[in-house]
Image: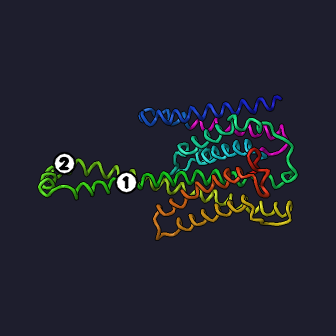
């Protein structure tokens, strides 16, 4: 009873802290001068990581197995995976460190909010593992899969942000060119004289703004590639370990189960991403489009297939899930 109470306290503390972090982000959008807001949000993310870690460890000790046997536990583990993706680069203090809490904080509050909602109340109390899950492969396979989902989702969100910035710039340039075409020659001549007078202040401002946008796009592309590459490695390990586990449990390495099929589709999409990303003849926008497609496919693989409740992973359906 004490372990269960402690677990719920830690979960609610982490949810409250991450809510405050998001509030700080919203305030910082309006007030850039307060430098302490950034450090407060970073400390909040670290506190959230330790709270979720403590809740998972407490549940592990209380129930005697890694907490990945149902949807509630996998969502908590997914939120922990989001927090560790933010925490590791922060502690390593990378030179080109990108503020990942812009992506990870909303992801954590979304997954925790759904996990602690009334829809999953029945799964807050763990049960005895079904025979198929009573294996040492549970920790290896399921943890790798959930970690891969978290990494691939974060990397895909960064790619989506890259697309938004790029296409906004394209739309702005397109609208400006249309305005120039619609102007008459006489009006264009008057504007030419006015723009010639204001040439120096504009040229001093636009290059700095374009340089900042270029640097932001480069950072988004770099960190998206890093995180997706890590997630792809986790996904590959998860699929291979799952195949070995399936051979032990069902007598076959691959059965084209809906869960297995969508995991293979996810792996294929992100292998295409890595190919386009490493091809120097293709722009970063092309790989970002592939990653944004992968964002939707991951949710189908992780959550959508479980709604069907069919196949060999039927114990992983709503309300029970394994990976």
| Colour scheme | rainbow
* Relative image position of residue 256 (x, y in whole percent): 74, 65
* Relative image position of residue 263 (x, y in whole percent): 68, 60
Q: On the picture, is 63 further left or further right than 102?
A: right
Residue 240 falls in which quadrant of the image? Answer: bottom right
Quadrant in which the N terminus appears = top right
* Helix, strand or loop at mark 1: helix
User: Residue 157 appears at what percent x and percent y?
Assistant: 54, 51
Residue indicated by mark 2: 198
Q: Quadrant of residue 3?
A: top right
- Tell me which label, 2 or 1, sits earlier in the chain: 1
Query: Pointer 2 and pointer 1: residues touching (CB < 8 Å)?
Result: no
Residue beneath the point at 86% across and 60% down:
249
Q: Residues within 10 Å of mark 2 (few under 14, many from 20)?
A: few
Report the predominant secondary structure element of the magenta stretch.
helix
Give the residues drawn in magenta, as a range. 42-67
Decide whether residue 313 is among the magenta residues: no
Percent coordinates x, y for residue 257 in the rendering:
75, 61
For disc 1, the marked residue is: 169
Q: Which one is nearer the viewer's eye here, 185 or 160?
A: 185
Please tell me which residue is depicted at 27% across the width and 49% down the height of the picture: 204
- Nearer the observer: mark 2 or 1; the answer is 1
Q: Is residue 17 above or below residue 303?
A: above
Does residue 179 appear to the left or right of 170 in the view shown? left
**Residue drawn at x 52%, y 48% as measured from the top left:** 98
């Amino acid at each position: 009873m004490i372990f269960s109470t402690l677990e719920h306290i830690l979960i609610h503390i982490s949810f409250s802290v991450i809510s405050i972090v998001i509030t700080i982000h919203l305030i910082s959008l309006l007030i850039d001068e307060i430098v302490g807001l950034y450090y407060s949000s970073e400390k909040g993310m670290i506190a959230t990581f330790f709270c979720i870690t403590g809740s998972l460890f407490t549940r592990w000790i209380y129930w005697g197995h890694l907490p990945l046997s149902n949807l509630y536990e996998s969502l908590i583990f997914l939120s922990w995976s989001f927090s560790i993706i933010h925490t590791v680069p922060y502690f390593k203090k990378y030179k080109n460190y990108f503020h990942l809490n812009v992506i990870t904080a909303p992801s954590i509050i979304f997954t925790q909010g759904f996990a602690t909602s009334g829809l999953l109340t029945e799964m807050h109390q763990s049960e005895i593992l079904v025979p198929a899950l009573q294996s040492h492969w549970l920790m290896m396979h399921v943890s790798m899969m959930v970690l891969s989902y978290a990494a691939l989702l974060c990397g895909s969100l960064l790619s989506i942000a890259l697309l938004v910035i790029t296409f906004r710039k394209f739309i702005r340039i397109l609208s400006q060119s249309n305005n120039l075409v619609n102007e008459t020659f006489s009006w264009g001549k008057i504007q030419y004289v006015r723009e010639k007078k204001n040439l120096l202040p504009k040229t001093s401002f636009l290059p700095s703004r374009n340089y900042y946008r270029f640097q932001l796009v480069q950072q988004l592309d770099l960190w998206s590639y890093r995180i997706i590459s890590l997630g792809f490695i986790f996904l590959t390990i998860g699929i291979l370990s799952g195949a070995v586990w399936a051979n032990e449990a069902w007598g076959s390495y691959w059965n084209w189960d809906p869960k297995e099929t969508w995991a293979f589709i996810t792996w294929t999409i992100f292998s295409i991403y890595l190919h386009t990303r490493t091809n120097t003849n293709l722009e970063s926008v092309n790989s970002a489009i592939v990653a944004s497609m992968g964002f939707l496919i991951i949710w189908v693989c992780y959550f959508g297939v479980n709604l069907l409740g069919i196949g060999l992973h039927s114990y992983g359906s709503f309300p029970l899930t394994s990976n």
